[in-house]
Structure formats: structure tokens, C-alpha cells
Image (cartoon, helix red, strand yellow):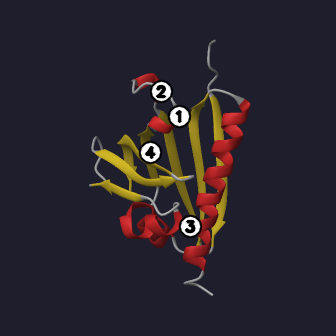
Amino acid sequence: MESKNLIAISETIINAPVEEVWEALVSPAEIKKYMFNTTVVSDWKRGSKIVWKGDWKGKPYEDKGEILEIHPKKRLQYSHFSPLGGQIDAPENYHIVTIDLEEDKNKTKISLSQDKNPTEEAKMESEKNWTMMLSGLKTLLEERHP
């Protein structure tokens, strides 16, 4: 069965300056607060590894990838592989996650996409998870800007 390349998309506008949104995207302490209590390890340089560790629905996991693009306050793009998906660890099974930031006054628009969703159901599940993550990020940062 040939898999489709369905792209999951999630967007939000956060009432916080782009500098703060960017810091929250690359700070392991901040990521842990809004991304399902995930521990992230990376030096945030192009070509560097990135690892996510934690528990998802009661199962421990260790996902991995590589920083593909990093343009502070503009774009973060990385590959991502999760063994929980049941696929073998091969380049064709890595998603590409792209996060673009756009500042307008003291608000920041985040546009996130994840490629290689093999089914419409997988795409919808990815969108649901990314929307929850962005919602957590929005709540975290907007609590600092009442």
C-alpha cells in the first residue's frame, strides 16, 4: 500500500512578542511545560540531533530527529521519528516539522506543518496533537502578558 503525503497543519496567534515565543520553542525547560511534559535535548544548531523523551499515553518513548533549519525568531524545521508509530527507523519514515513565526506588533502568528501523514486519520491525529501543543504554548506565554 502506497502511503500518501498528507500534511497536518496547525496555527495560532499568541499575544506575546516573537522573542518570547522563539525562546519557548528552543528552551528545554519551557518545552517541558507545554509539550506533554517532554524532555528535549538538542544544541539547536543546523545539522544537530534532537531527542524527545517522556511518556505518551502511559508508554515511555524516545523520539529523535535532526535540526534541518534554524532561523531565530523566524523558522525552526526538524525531522522527527517516533518508534511508537510502529515503523522501522528509516529516512522515509521521518516526518518534517516546520514551525514558522510571523510577528505583528506584540503578537506572534505560529504556523506549524508536519508532512508524511499516511492516512487522513493520521493527519487528523497529528493536527489534534499539534493544536494541543500550540494551545499549551499560547496559554503558557499569555499568562505572562495579562
Between the residue at mark 4 and the residue at mark 1, the CA separation in whole angstroms equals 20 Å
Q: From the viewer's perspective, tell me whether residue 123 is left or right of residue 112.
A: right
Q: From the viewer's perspective, tell me whether residue 135 is left or right of residue 19.
A: right
Q: For the residues carrying marks 4 and 1, which lies nearer the camera in this image?
A: 1
Q: Position of residue 25 (x, y in %)?
A: 45, 61
Residue appearing at x 62%, y 13% in the figure: 2
- Which of pointers 2 and 4 lies earlier in the amino acid sequence? 4
Q: Amino acid at mark 2?
A: Asn
- Which of pointers 3 and 1 lies earlier in the amino acid sequence? 1
Which corner quadrant of the image does residue 3 belong to?
A: top right
| Mark 2 neighbour class, 10 Å CA radius: few under 14, some 14 to 19, many 20 or more | some
Q: Amino acid at mark 4?
A: Gln
Between the residue at mark 4 and the residue at mark 3, the CA separation in whole angstroms equals 17 Å
Q: Position of residue 115 (x, y in %)?
A: 57, 34
Between the residue at mark 2 and the residue at mark 4, the CA separation in whole angstroms equals 16 Å
Between the residue at mark 1 and the residue at mark 2, the CA separation in whole angstroms equals 9 Å
Q: For the residues carrying marks 2 and 4, which lies nearer the camera in this image?
A: 2
The residue singled out by tag 2 in the image is 93
Residue appearing at x 59%, y 43% in the figure: 113
Tell me the quadrant of the picture where the C terminus can be found: bottom right
Please, is residue 12 above or below residue 91 in the view?
Answer: below
Query: Are the residues tagged 4 and 3 within 8 Å (C-beta)?
Result: no
Q: Which mark is residue 85?
A: 1
| Mark 1 neighbour class, 10 Å CA radius: few under 14, some 14 to 19, many 20 or more | few
Residue appearing at x 57%, y 52% in the figure: 57
Between the residue at mark 3 and the residue at mark 2, the CA separation in whole angstroms equals 27 Å
Query: Are the residues tagged 3 and 1 within 8 Å (C-beta)?
Result: no
Q: From the viewer's perspective, tell me whether residue 38 is left or right of residue 105.
A: left
SS type, badge 2: helix
Q: Position of residue 123 (x, y in %)?
A: 67, 37
Q: Position of residue 4 (x, y in %)?
A: 64, 22
Which corner quadrant of the image does residue 134 belong to?
A: bottom right
